[in-house]
Image (spheres, helix red, strand yellow):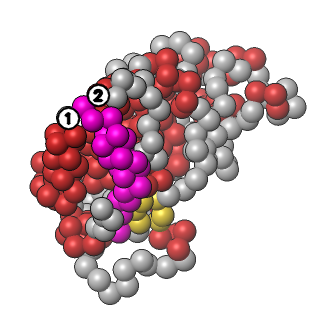
Amino acid sequence: MNHFMARLIFCFFAENTEIFDGAGAFTAAIESMSAKDSSNTHDVISTLFRAMNTKIKERAAAAIPRWAERFPYVNGGLFSGSAEVPRFSRIARAYLLHIGSLDWKKINPDIFGSMIQAVADDDERGALGMHYTSVPNILKVLNPLFLDELRQQLEEAIDNTRVLLNLRKRMSKIRVFDPACGSGNFLVIAYKEMRAIEAEINRRRGEADRRTEIPLTNFRGIELRDFPAEIARLALIIAEYQCDVLYRGQKEALRDFLPLDAQNWIRAESDRGGSPYPGEPRSSSMRTIQSARIPL
């Protein structure tokens, strides 16, 4: 179910941002190809997921139907593995179509933390130490930790292209690690703030549409539960695309986006074979503040 939810979030975002061919393509396919009584809704969605995990040249052999061929090859691990989808009731199908009709273009990845907390009960939040950290509070950590210094160096560089180049190279080597990353808010905010600084560097150097040199894999995290870890990785992917659109333009962002990188740089407990913090309290915000290491 966790993987299924992450896939849905990606598809709703992709159909509103030209990643998929045609606005609302994913939702429209479900509406037109699934029966109104919802009897085959799960099969339609499963077929779409299979298409997104199948390279174009391999789709004939995989028996991907023609109506699903318009969807791109996404890969990146997001659609790999089982394509099994839960069965939908008539009401659940209606809710799904309604959610798909919303505008996901400007979805803020920062909200994923509060979204996950909303579906967790009080006992679970208490047992796991789940605490949503707001953007202002995250910046209270990130700014003095290393962002203020980067901005100061940018200000001092003015338009010196050599100094600006050195600063950009330095930023490309910065690693941000959150050992209790939850849904990735800390990492997402760090990434977006660094992209803003890099964009200003590129503007001053006359390279406004230059591809970023700040890789997502520089923003690493560990999380106890699989679902938040999956969402953290997805949030960073969405943040990267949004930053590319903002700083490089839609055309350049689309050109470099798919297929997704298959690397997994956000680790869950199941990846490690045991609890990453045996016997320790589980407060995401506090562990982040105490344990973040930024080589400057």
- Whether 92 is drawn above or below 166: the answer is above
> Is residue 172 in the magenta section?
yes
Q: Where in the figure is residue 4, as x and y percent of width and height?
A: 53, 44
- Whether 208 is drawn above or below 160: the answer is above
* Sooner in the amino-acid sequence: mark 2 or mark 1: 1
Tell whether 35 sits left or right of 251: right
Count how many numbered circles sit on residues in the image.
Answer: 2
| Residue 78 seen anywhere in this rendered image of the structure | yes
Locate residue 76: give its quadrant.
top right
Q: Amino acid at mark 1?
A: Ile
Q: Where in the figure is residue 100, as x and y percent of width and height?
A: 42, 24
> Looking at the image, which residue is at 22% across and 73% down?
290
Tell me the distance, in whole angstroms, between the alpha carbons under discs 2 and 1.
8 Å
| Residue named by callout 2 | 204
Q: Are marks 2 and 1 in contact (CB under 8 Å)?
A: yes
Residue most toward the right? 61
Magenta segment, which residues?
159-179
Tell whether 211 sits left or right of 117: right
Q: Where in the figure is residue 126, as x and y percent of width and height?
A: 23, 69
> Looking at the image, which residue is at 67% across and 50% down?
81
| Residue named by callout 1 | 158
Out of 90 and 160, give the one closest to the viewer: 160
> Looking at the image, which residue is at 50% across and 30% down?
11
Label 2: how many Cα within 10 Å (few below 14, some 14–19, many 20+): some
| Residue 109 seen anywhere in this rendered image of the structure | no
- Looking at the rendered structure, which numbered label has been put on residue 79? none
- Whether 104 is drawn above or below 127: the answer is above
Label 1: how many Cα within 10 Å (few below 14, some 14–19, many 20+): few
Q: Amino acid at mark 2?
A: Arg
> Is residue 27 in the magenta section?
no
Out of 68 and 164, give the one closest to the viewer: 164
Please tell me whether mark 1 sits on a helix, a strand or a loop: loop
